[in-house]
Each structure stands twice: as C-alpha cells, then as structure tokens.
Image (cartoon, coloured by chain):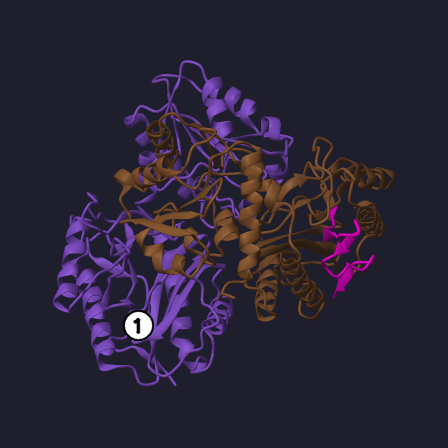
Chain colours: A purple, B brown
Amino acid sequence: MNDLSFPNCEFENRAARVQASMRHRELDALVLTAPANFRYFTGLDSQFWESPARPWFLVIPAQGSTIAVIPEIAEVAMKQCVAGSIKTWPSPRPEDEGVTLLASVLESVPRRFAKIGFELGRESFLRMPVLDFLRLRDLLSGVQIVDGAPCIWEVRNIKSKAEIEKIRLAGHIVSHSFEAVASYASKGMTEAEVCRSLTVDILQKGAHSVPYVACASGQGGYDQIIARGGQRELRDGDVLIIDVGATVDGYFCDFDRNYAVGKVADRAMRANEAVWDATEAGIKAARSGVKVRDLWQTMMRVLHAAGMRGNNAGRLGHGLGLQLTEPPSNCEADEAMLEPGMVITIEPGMEYEEGKLIVHEENIAITEDGFADVLTIRAPREMWRLS
Amino acid sequence: MNDLSFPNCEFENRAARVQASMRHRELDALVLTAPANFRYFTGLDSQFWESPARPWFLVIPAQGSTIAVIPEIAEVAMKQCVAGSIKTWPSPRPEDEGVTLLASVLESVPRRFAKIGFELGRESFLRMPVLDFLRLRDLLSGVQIVDGAPCIWEVRNIKSKAEIEKIRLAGHIVSHSFEAVASYASKGMTEAEVCRSLTVDILQKGAHSVPYVACASGQGGYDQIIARGGQRELRDGDVLIIDVGATVDGYFCDFDRNYAVGKVADRAMRANEAVWDATEAGIKAARSGVKVRDLWQTMMRVLHAAGMRGNNAGRLGHGLGLQLTEPPSNCEADEAMLEPGMVITIEPGMEYEEGKLIVHEENIAITEDGFADVLTIRAPREMWRLS
C-alpha cells in the first residue's frame, strides 16, 4: 500500500489496459501532459497545474514502465507517486522547456510501429506550448506523431469499482449539502452568497475541492447555466439553480438542484416536474448495451411531450470522472454505447418558455449487471422551497 | 457601468492596448482560447472551463471590435460580457467544433499583414484540440499563423490600479486567514485537515475561489512545496508550510506562510530568518528599471551567505494576476525589467540541509513612483507557532 488514493494494483491495472490499447492501435509510446491524465496514471495530487510556467510529461511505452519527464521542482513529489523512472530538467528554461530531454527519452523507447501518441484529439488539450510541440515533432526523426486521445478515453471511460466509490462519495456529500441549502438560503440573498455558503458546507462535509459552481436564477426559470452566481438577489417567484462539480481524491460528481423561491408560477412547477420525469426515464433507460443516442432520444421524447422549445446545451449529459465532463456526449451524433463501468450524467433540460430554462442532473454508473446505479441522492420531484 | 468586476473603460483600455501591440507586431488578428485571456478581454466569470467538451474563441482584430466565436450554450452568458459581436455553433459537434465558423470569421477580418496570432508560445496553452488547430491552419489560405503570446503578456503584465486592488484584497484576506491558523491548528492534526479549515476561512473572509493550496511539513523543514496537504500528522519540531493561491474577481494572490510546530531546531529557525531577510532584500530591491535577474541576484546573495545548498524551483518569484503564475520569472535567464504596474511575487527559498527547504513569499506591485507596494501583510520575521 502507498500513500496515494488507490492501492498500487489500481495503477498497474490502468497501465496494463492502456498498453494493451496502445499495442492494438500500433503506438510505441504515449506522451501525456494534461493534469487528469497525469493523475490517472501516477496518482499525483497537486494543484501546481495552476502555474503554466512548466510543462510535465509522462511517457508510457507500449511495454515496460513509465518515464516521468518533469521539471526539477516536481521530483520529490513525483517520487511518492507511481512512475517507473524520473528524468528532470532545471525549469523554468523557456528556450528548452523539457523539449530536448523529452525527445531523447522518446528516442530511447523501442520502435516497432514508429508511431507516438499525444493528446491531440477529442476533448484533449496539450498542456505545453504548441511551438514546443511542433519543435519536438521536428526533433523526432522517423516517427509519426498521432492522436493518442482514443487510447486514453478507451481506458479512462471504464471506471473501476474504487473509482466509482470516489464519485459516489462526492455525489453523496454534495447531495447532503444541496439539501441543506433550504436551511440558510432565502429571499434577498444574492446568488453569490448562497454559492459561498454551499461551497463552504461541501468542504466541511469532506469534499477535497469544489472547482465548479455555476448558478443562475430568474422568474420561473433561468436563461443560462454556466456563469458563476452574481449579485442578483433572490425574489419571490424565482427558480434558483446551482450546478456543482466537487471532488474526492480528484474524482468529480457533477449535478445540479433547483429551488423554488416563495411562490413560483404553476407552469414553472409543471416544467420542473416534466424535467424530473425525463431524468427518471433517462435513469431507467441507461443500461449496458444501450447507445447514448437512444438514451438521449428517450429523454427528448419526455421533454418534447412537455412542450420543450429548445436546449442550447447540445446534449443531455456526458461522461465524468477525473474531469467535470468527459466523453461520451448524450446526443444524437455520439456513437458510444453504455458498458459496465461507465459513469455518466443524466442531464435533461429544456427552455419551456422564451428565456426560461429548467435543467436537472444526476450521476449514474453502469453496474456489472448492466443497470444504472445512481451515485447521487435523487432530487425530489417537487423542487425544494426557499422562503 | 455593467455587472462585471470592472467598468467598461477598463475593457476598452485593454482592447486598445492589445490592438496597439498587434499593429506594432504586424498582426491582423489575435485568436484567444485560454480562460484567463477570455476573462481579461470580456469579463466572463465562469468555471465552465472545467469542461473540455467545447472550445471558445475570441477574435480581436487589429482595428474594430472583438468577435466571440462560442458554443451556443455560452451565448446568453456572453451577452452580459464585453464582446463586439457573437457567433455561435451548436456544440458538442466533434467533427467540426467551431473550426469552420472560426475560419470564416477570420477570413472576414481585414488583412494588412496576412498574420494572425494564436496562443502558441511562452507560458501559453491552446485550449482546443491540436488536430483542430492544424486543420484550421490549413483552412486559412494566404495567412501566416504566428505566436500571439508576446502581445498578450506585454499587455497583461502591466496591471491597472483596479486590477492591483483586486490582488491586494485577495492578499489581505489570505493574510488574515494565515494568521488565524495558529488559533486552530496544532500537533496531531493532519496537513489536509489544516488546509481544509484554512480554505473554508479564506472563503468565509470573502475570497471568490481558492484554486491553489499546497502544503508540506517535516522536521525542521520540508522536502517539496507543490503537493496538496496529505495525511501526515503535525509533530513537535516540524516546520509546516502552506502556499495559497486565492482569487478576488479572478485575480490571484499567491504566497505562503511557515509555522513552527512546538519546539523547532535552532538551525531551522535561523534558516527561516535568513529567508525572511532575503525576502526583505527582494522587496527593497524591487524598483522600476531593475531587471528581474538583478532582483534574483540580490536575494541569492542573502541566501548563499546563509548557507544555501540549492533551490529546485529554478526562480525566486514570478508575475501574477489572472493566473497563479505569469511571466516574468525572477531568475538569471530572464531579461525582463520591472515597470510601474507589474505585480510579482518575491519568493526566496533554500534547501539549508539535505531534504530541508524553507520558502517564503510575498506579493508586490511596482507603483507609479517606481517602488514596491506590498500587497500582502508581511510575515513576521519569526515563524508563527503552533502548540
């Protein structure tokens, strides 16, 4: 056992799975730079990613152990994590920020397919300056740089039982905190004040961080769901939504709750219940072997029957794990099929009148038996009330 | 006046400054994707960046008003921010995630130099899949894609008085919270427990978010400064360090405090005072017209005289603002010169015995008069004590 959030076998299993996928996709190595990928394979728990001065690289060869190519400042912390070997450079050094060291490490990796994967594709960003990436590409002779994202998502999208328990714990903490909102929030408070109290309560109940709090309010509904809570004061007839992404050992829950402030218009209450029903239909439909587009279709039918005018989110839920959102997207265009170990949000929402949105969200895992295991404490069908 | 954190004239001034820099550097347009750059020019306050599913683009032409090219879900929130016009696409749509729309917008920008800047260089990451960037580059005929980072940092590195007041407020909130640690932290508590209480206190005192908390402890010093606080229990003779990046309206303070747990070895106390003295020397040396490398040299002299063995951070401070760290780096290789409006950390640290580090940090702004205005409440020369 180590001092990380998982036993060593968890990390060994992740490495073995990604290496199998790499060999299948004919990659000699995978180079990772993004915080969630670094944490997934090494266990590193750091918020040092907030500083853009220094890139970090994790090299996973198709066989054998990983090589962390990292700035000197990171060496001691890295030694307490999972990495086969560690190479460092003195950083910051903008004129060669790890580029030649990484190139020399990659030259030493055995070549069978002459292909190396980087985080270039779907829902992936390279956490290094693009100019350095292009320079590195030029330094690597006789090797093709290709997209490693399919490899990464194939592995990360199937969660272990231990990972699912982290998300469940986050989901339960935030569920209890959401329920407690009614005990302190009321008319006259600003959105920002409610969000601050909620964030504090989530931390006090045991979450490790609260990187995402979106909040909006308006008469009978809200007109967007992505901004932070502002200086708007809650008033009679408002519907308040708060959407929270909080973590336990890096794993996110991501779901929202709606609150009725005083007396809310009947049509808003009915729209809210319709969206709750769509959530229920989504949870019931989420089974192993079902395509996410069918899940989307099931929820859309309920929303359309309730008078949906639109939904600018472009999807009704998504994967989650070490990131607030991960593939797949529950939408018409996504080919993904649900499998045991996948964790997704069920997130129907609709504009039921112009400028009035209602959005619900719960988190589920697909069990070995193929059913949906709800990781959040299900919202009541009728909104909680604030006085 | 708007509902943003700054009056409109602040944003107008930012746009005018970056456009002057663009014309000087012969750019027809600048395309921004990173959260801090988006917020800097539009005022957008959202944590939606946690979701990697959808890129956002802000196009700043060399003359005229900005064009936000964003996913549909962001339109309503964007309308409350500063943008000349808004173009949207239905997202997620991985096969064309804004790429052709952005290309058509860029084709419509007047061409004088046939050069467009992107966030490609120093301390910049492109928040879009690299494959999409390369595809976009191919779509843009007759135009050169170049590094826009020098333009961006030239403007962002000089803060307005209003920006500096945000950082000062964050610095004062966290200073008071650091001082309060001694009232609840003591032997037997874990690092993680202390960090949680501190984070809650910082939020309750009015900071908007606390994205960075690093913590370490050890007998007479610590061996790294970047990991999150763990399950290690504080014991007699420890030095505890906590390093916090907290925000007000998106602006970071970034500084640390050291605590002596019970009776700490004399040599650790002396090392601590030497690092305090180096900080003091750094603050006094930080004046308009001084190069950051000279500032670094001034602090290094004090540390070497005190028996410094090493420092793997590679620098003794850095810029800060909308990011926890920004250029320049206070180190030998950096050519930057201090100017009025620059905000930097003064961050000397040393390994005084093997595996025993002591690091201090304060935040300063360079005033119109050319002196250092300390934005944090200066640490006492002798460490605060925990019983």
State yes or no: residue B372 in magenta.
yes
Element carrying mark 1: loop
Q: Which residue is drawn at 50% across and 73% down?
A: A193
Q: Residue furthest right?
A: B305
Q: Mark 1 points at which residue?
A: A221
State yes or no: residue B284 in magenta.
no
Q: In this view, does B355 lie to the left or right of B3?
A: right
Q: Choose top left, top right, bottom left or bottom right for residue A117.
A: top left
Q: In this view, does A164 lie above or below B19?
A: below
Please rate how many residues cluster around mark 1, counting C-alpha atoms within 10 Å: few if below 14, some from 14 to 19, many from 20: many
**Nearer to the camera, B217 or B123:** B123
Q: What stretch is highlighted in magenta?
A: B358-387
Residue A170, position in %: x, y? 41, 61
What chain does badge 1 belong to? Answer: A
Q: Is residue B356 above or below residue B363?
A: above
Is residue A80 shown to the viewer in this render?
no
Q: Residue at x 71, y 56 (%)?
A: B257
Residue A196, position in %: x, y? 50, 70
Q: In this view, does B340 lie above or below B9?
A: above
Q: What residue type is labelled 1?
A: Gly
Residue B117, position in %: x, y? 48, 34
Residue B116, position in %: x, y? 46, 33
Question: Which quadrant is home to the C terminus of chain A?
Answer: bottom left
Q: Which residue is drawn at 26% across and 38% down?
A: B95
Is residue B199 shown to the viewer in this render?
yes
